[in-house]
Amino acid sequence: MAEEQEQTDVADLSYEEARQELVDLVARLEGGQAGLEESMRLWQRGEALASHCEAWLDKAEASLASESTPDE
């Protein structure tokens, strides 16, 4: 399943999908079983997933902030 997720464009993933793939990816890297080239590929994918999640959270935070601002 992880290989299938790696084929998916990060922009097409929901927050939950991207976060879960990132968690799985970190576990693979921490396991130390990947070679150097695979580790670099995983790291780059992880950076893209982390950026996607951060952007999604920033957007959600901005949306919540605008909703909680009283109208003047």
Image (cartoon, rainbow, N blue to C red):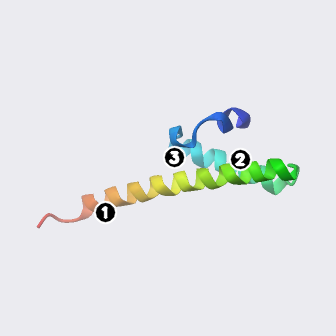
Q: Amino acid at mark 3?
A: Tyr
Q: CA distance from mark 3 to mark 1?
A: 19 Å
Real-space CA distance between mark 3 and mark 2, rounded to the nearest whole angstrom: 14 Å
Within 10 Å of disc 1 (Cα), the crowding (few <14, some 14-19, many 20+) is few
Residue drawn where x is 18% and y is 65% of the image:
70
Give residue 2's quadrant in the image.
top right
What residue lies at 39% left-to-right and 54% top-to-bottom? Answer: 60
**Mark 1: secondary structure:** helix
Question: Percent from the top left, x then y, of residue 31?
Answer: 84, 53
Residue position marked by numbered label 2 in the rendering: 24
Q: What is the secondary structure assignment of the residue under circle 3? A: helix
Q: Which numbered disc flags the more N-terminal residue, 1 or 2?
A: 2
Q: Residues within 10 Å of mark 2 (few under 14, many from 20)?
A: some
Whether residue 20 sits left or right of residue 66 in the image: it is right
Amino acid type indicated by mark 1: Ala
Please, which residue is most extreme toward the front here?
37
